[in-house]
Image (tube, coloured by chain):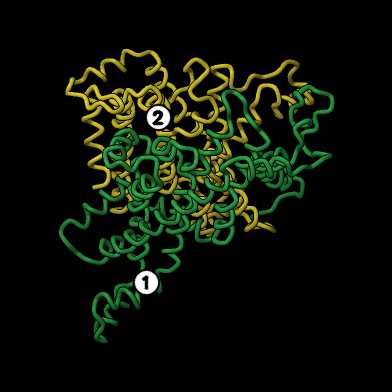
Chain colours: A yellow, B green
Amino acid sequence: MFIAYPFALGVWLSLSNSTVGEPGHFIGLANFYKIFSDSIFRTAAYNTFVYTAITTVFKLALGLWLAMLLNRHFRGKAWVRAFILLPFIIPTVLSTLAWKWMFDPTFSVFNWLFWKLHIINSRINWLGDPDLAMTSIMIVNVWRGVPFYAISLLAGLQTINPDLHEAAAIDGANRFQRFWHVTWPLLLPVTMVVVLFSVIQTFADFQLVYVLTGGGPANATHLFATYAYQIGIGTGLLSEGAAISLAMFPALLLVVVFQLWYIRRVENR
Amino acid sequence: MIEGARWKKWLWFYLPLGAFIVALLFPFYWMVVTTVRPDGELYRPWNHPLYSPFWTSHPTFEHIRDLLQETLFNTWMLNTMFIALVSTLISLLCGVIAGYALARLTFRWAGILGTAIFVTYLVPQTLLFIPLAEIIRDYHIGDTPWALILTYPTFLIPFCTWLMMGYFKAIPRELEECARIDGAARWQAMLYIIFPIAVPGILSAGIFAFTLSWNEFIYALVFLSSPEQKTVAVGVTSELIRGDVFFWGSLMAGALIGSVPVAIVYSFFVEHYVAGITGSVKG
């Protein structure tokens, strides 16, 4: 209901030649032809897939590790858990601004640190170099996503009966075997759901790139959403912008369908 | 848990945990330090001999004062507060009622409708912001708080409905049936029996919805244009940067103070918030 109308309008826009304030008329798939032959769009598409894939792997690995650390008993656990969620709850653009400041080419605290540790001699231009800028954006995304993974997976870990671990240990399983044959299979349903959620959010990400680089340097770090914003709102080519954001749709649909299928399968088991 | 030697525990437990904590919290520490650092010290290049990153010898409140007196920061805070509260209340009301209906009433399309709600809740905001901007313009509510109050529920209502549906399903039906047998009407059973039990769930959904609307960025960025209408996130990122000049002291002060309301709400309801996260990803 809420989504159907904007969605239909979006499809219509993407098939027309509307600009801001000018209702256009039907021009078929011309916008899609245009964006697919646009090299910046292809860079953005490539970036989005790479960005989603790499950050998801890191978020899952680090999140799982942190969840397993938090699953043990230690003093001050409640405090640690509360503080660890901060990156996830603080408004993303605001915390990203802090990162932008830490990545500043002239005043970067990381440069200072690496310099003092004798790792570098000249400055690292974190956001100025295309590849490095993408890496920096990924670092911030992982930083923001790890708490979400950790807390969700921790909830999953807590439902696993410790007796299973004890039984496996008595049968002679080492730490790694216990993880691989006991923890991982039992945690898989939760993991899948968390990963799919996060993939959707990451794939459609906007704020990090908008704040850190604005798509630059030289349009090298655009994602679908930021490029759609630049074309649709920045230059006022509404229909083309709508086409760019709708280009996300097939991949998102695939993830959602997979997620629904997976949930149904787990429920029916 | 099988315990090994002491140093092993340090190596495999305290060390990584400590590293995680430092990495996750350092940006916030950096925000605080930057906020109270005087400009003269702030703009020292990274290889300056006196670059003192982790403390400041002359803390100042100059940036905070600038922020509160020279900019529209207070207006942005009030705007955000108003928008977040109203859209949360609207969404919570709709979400509780719809969630109850989907969990309890057995009408033909309930299953499909539940799935539809779930899918709607998964739709990212960046997919539809351009058509929504058109709709906002057609109704002439662009650049007013109503543009956001009416669009935030598009993702908040599905979210609240989904969360509440799960919550209501976990409350045994027998409770209600007892009340019905004792002569209560359906709405009475709902209002006096079920809702009081569902309060923790409602709190979770409300807190989550509040932080979601406080943190929302792209709709606010696209639908609002005049400085005095902006929300904190948009105001801080657009109005405190003139051309290429970043006022880092005030920026960090804005980021810090702009995060405080969410942090306060969060700190009071950590458990509910965590329940919200785990509930929101539960199939």
Q: Nearer the viewer, residue A66 or B216?
A: B216
Residue A50 in the image, given as x and y percentages of width and height = 45, 25
Q: Secondary structure at mark 2?
A: helix
Q: Secondary structure at mark 1?
A: helix
- Residue drawn at x 29%, y 35% is B134
Give the residue furthest to the left. B108
Residue A224 in the image, given as x and y percentages of width and height = 39, 26
Residue B147 occupies quadrant: top left
Q: Nearer the viewer, residue A83 or B206?
A: B206
- Residue drawn at x 63%, y 45% is B68
Labels 1 & 2 near each other (Cβ < 8 A): no
Q: Which residue is mark 1?
A: B195
Q: Amino acid at mark 1?
A: Phe
Q: What chain letter is assigned to the residue under label 2?
A: A
- Horizontally, residue B226 falls left or right of residue A268, namely right
- Residue drawn at x 43%, y 53% is B209
User: Does the image show residue B148?
Assistant: yes
The image's mark for residue A225 is 2
Instruction: Please rate how many residues cluster around mark 2, counting C-alpha atoms within 10 Å: few if below 14, some from 14 to 19, many from 20.
Output: many
Residue A66 in the image, given as x and y percentages of width and height = 59, 45
Q: Nearer the viewer, residue A44 or A172?
A: A44
Instruction: Please rate how many residues cluster around mark 1, counting C-alpha atoms within 10 Å: few if below 14, some from 14 to 19, many from 20.
Output: some
- Horizontally, residue B225 falls left or right of residue A134, namely left
Q: Amino acid at mark 2?
A: Ala
Q: What chain letter is assigned to the residue under label 1?
A: B
Residue B153 in the image, given as x and y percentages of width and height = 35, 50
Q: CA distance from mark 1 to mark 2?
A: 40 Å
